[in-house]
Amino acid sequence: MRLTQSQIIILGIILCVGIVLALLFSCVIPGLQSCDTPAVKITGVLSVWGVESSEDAYRTSFAVWQSEYPGVKVEYKNFTTGEEYENALLDALASGNGPDVFMVRNGTLQKYKNKIAPFSPVQFPVTKVRTLFPQVVENDFVSQGAVYALPLTIDTLALFYNRDLMDAAAAEVPHDWNTFADVAQKLTVRDVGGRITRAGAAFGG
C-alpha cells in the first residue's frame, strides 16, 4: 500500500515522539523522571583496632563516619601494649579475620604490606599525600606508587627561646638549622677553663 504524504508526515511525527520518550526514560536526556542513581544503604560493622588509645580519642571521628553511614556500626578494640597488639594483628590478618581499619607504626609497612590493600590511585593518589603531608609520610606509608596508610599524628619540632638572652647576644630567631647552630654558639657561655656553664640550646633526649 502506497502511503500518502500526509500519512508519511504523521508516521514521522509518531516516530520522533517515540524516540524522544525512549531517551527520556532511559535518562539519555533529562526529563520528568529522576535519573539519579538511588542511594545504596550500607549496613554492617566497621572493625577498628588501636593500641594504647581509648575509644574516646576517636569518638568525634566515629560520630562523623556514622552520620554519613548510619547503618554501619563502629566497633573499636584497644590493646594496652604494642607487643600484644602486634601479635593479635598478625594472627588475625594471617587467618583472614583482620580488622577493617588498624594502626601500623611508621617503618613497619613491609611487615604488613602483603596482607593489606592500598588505596586505589583514584581514591587517594600519591600526589595528594605529597600535597597534604611532609615527605616522611610518603617514606613510611607509600610503596611502589601505592598509598597504604595515612598518619594519625606527626611529631614536629617547636622552638622555645628566651628573648632576654637572645637580645643580650644580639641574636635573631633562627629560621633553619644553620642559623640555629650559629645562635646556639652565640648563647653558649663558658668559664675560664672552657667548660660550658650555660648551653646555647637544649636539644635531644
Image (tube, rainbow, N blue to C red):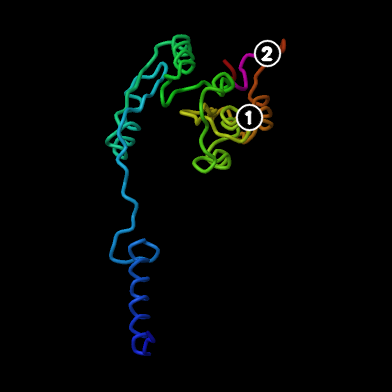
Q: Amino acid at mark 2?
A: Asp
Q: Residue furthest front?
A: 1
Where is 93 relative to 65, above or below? above
How many residues crowd around disc 2 within 10 Å: few (fewer than 14), some, or many (20 or more)?
few
Q: Which of the marked residues, 2 or 1, is nearer the chain's N terminus?
A: 1
Q: Residue furthest bottom?
A: 5
In what quadrant of the picture does the C terminus appear?
A: top right
Foreground of the two, 4 or 63: 4
Q: Magenta span has 199? A: yes
Q: Position of residue 180 (x, y in %)?
A: 64, 29
Q: Residue at x 49, y 41 (%)?
A: 123
Q: Amino acid at mark 1?
A: Ala
Q: Position of residue 76 (x, y in %)?
A: 34, 22
Residue matched to label 1: 169
Residue matched to label 2: 191
Q: Which mark is residue 158?
A: none
* Distance (Cα) linking label 2 and label 1: 17 Å
For residue 93, side relative to residue 36 (left or right): right
Where is 86 relative to 101, above or below? above
Foreground of the two, 134 or 121: 121
Q: Which residues are drawn in magenta?
A: 195-201
Q: Residue at x 41, y 16 (%)?
A: 52
Where is 124 relative to 59, above or below? below
Q: Residue at x 55, y 33 (%)?
A: 147
Q: Residue furthest right?
A: 193
How many residues crowd around disc 1 within 10 Å: few (fewer than 14), some, or many (20 or more)?
few
